[in-house]
Image (cartoon, grey):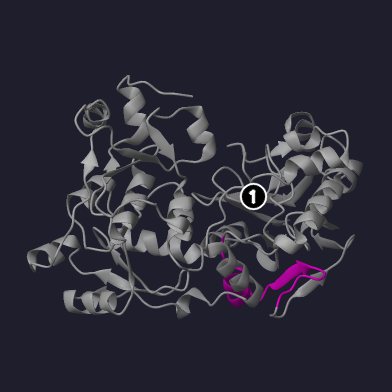
Amino acid sequence: MYFKQITTPGLGCLSYIIGCPGAKVCAVVDPKRDAQDYLDITREEGMRITHVIETHIHADHVSGNQELAAATGAEICYMEGSPITYPHTVLKEGDEMVLGNAKLRFLHTPGHTPHAMSILVTDTARADEPWLLLTGDLLFVGDVGRPDLAGEELFQEQAENLYRSLYHKLGYLPDRIEVFPAHGQGSLCGKGMSFKSNTTLGFERVANWAFQFTSKQAFLDQVLGEFPIRPMSFTHIITTNMNGAPLLERCPLEKSLSLESFKARMDAGAVVIDTRDTAAFGGVHIPASVNIGFDRQTANWVGMVVDPKAEIILVVEDKPQYDAMLLELHRIGYDNITGYLAGGISTWVFAGMPVEKLDQLPVQQLKDLIHRSDNGAPRIIDVRTPGEWEAGHLAEAQHLPLMQVLKEGIDAPRDEELIVICGSGYRSNIVASHLQENGYTEAKSVAGGMFAWANSGFPVTK
């Protein structure tokens, strides 16, 4: 049996190739949209992709099933009842698929989504007993799938489904089964995933919080609590995956925009994403642009800040950077990307176009401002997650998580000094640039964020 896990950095997506080189056939499970990796690997291993299997309808990334089906003619497979609008093969509880020495058995395991499944894998060349379990978004390493994505009206039902799938459906499987989930660290489909990308069922039963309850009600009381932020992109991604993503070759081709074309798109309402680092953006940038640079979770931040239906134009340093951002955007279904400013920010500046700056406040200066006696301490807004805040924060800061600021705004005069801080300065630049776009002329970002503050030996409150 051939088995390979493929990681998509940033989004925390894990996909799989399962097959048999002897029989020259394989299946791809939960593929990312940019599908060339699967085609390259299977060609090198001498296997043909006959099936593309989706453990559920994904909310955080656009599937590559359309790309693979177009390239190979593979069947796209979903669990029975999945609301898919394009041709696909329906799998039912207990169905099996044989790919040479690899045998796949499909289990209906709802909870994260109503029609989710797990895949029990047996290598018949070694034993008749199952070896691996692909759990989709049911069970992660250190966490379980969030049950809120199917909608508020199904929340309670999905939480109960989650309990039954974990405690009953998986309860019949032995501890030795190896677990391979569809997501790892960085995904927003759970809230406490390990950096490790696989585990065993037995270890999760001992160490995973979700298996530590003696009653269903105790489990429900815990699981119906708070969840990670739901980016605005999730609904768009779910709809795209239900209807089938357009092939990438149909997306707009590379387009280097002249200054005049770029400005015309801006004036028509296009969102400007400036991908440069926080310091470069702070020094000079195009008015009303938002700073989302390259980070481990770039796609997640875009999904929180930018409307998925918006036209997007980019400010980048060079063509490779444009290509890299294009890949991040396509993975979450942001396909309406008109192009990038030819020559970068220099083109805009040298043409004498209006510019703005976003002050990058050193932590030493922030400390002095906090202790000034004339006008009192400035308003400091910490936009990190609740967990980060509880781990340590400035005593003088106000906690307003990033998504709360983006959704609800800030109740403050437009000319008030607002100092935004996060972990490293990345998220504070996103928020401060958003505030600046909305007329808060004195918004500032703390350079280096809490890392710089703590490393300077300044006090932190818990």
Residue placed most toward the observer, 411 or 112: 411
Q: How many labels does the image show?
A: 1
Residue 364 coordinates in the image, percent (x, y): 23, 27
Residue 110 visible (yes or no): no
Quarter-of-image position of residue 171: top right
Q: Which region is colored magenta?
A: 61-84
Residue found 44% across the figure and 77% down from its top: 251
Residue placed most toward the observer, 412 or 342: 412
Residue placed most toward the observer, 154 or 303: 154
Q: In this view, does 395 lie above or below 266?
A: above
Residue placed most toward the observer, 135 or 176: 135
Is residue 192 left or right of 336 when viewed as pictured?
right
Residue 128 coordinates in the image, percent (x, y): 90, 46
Residue 117 coordinates in the image, percent (x, y): 78, 58
Whether residue 98 appears in magenta in the rendering, the answer is no
Whether residue 65 appears in magenta in the rendering, the answer is yes
- Count neighbours of disc 1 (C-alpha within 10 A) and say few if under 14, some if 14 to 19, many if 20 or more: few
Residue 60 visible (yes or no): yes
Q: Name the residue under label 1.
A: 4
Is residue 426 left or right of 193 when viewed as pictured?
left
Quarter-of-image position of residue 377: top left
Is residue 309 left or right of 256 when viewed as pictured?
right
Residue found 63% across the figure and 77% down from its top: 243
Residue 100 coordinates in the image, percent (x, y): 79, 59
Residue found 85% across the figure and 41% down from its top: 217
Residue type, label 1: Lys
- Asked which secondary structure carries label 1, the reply is strand
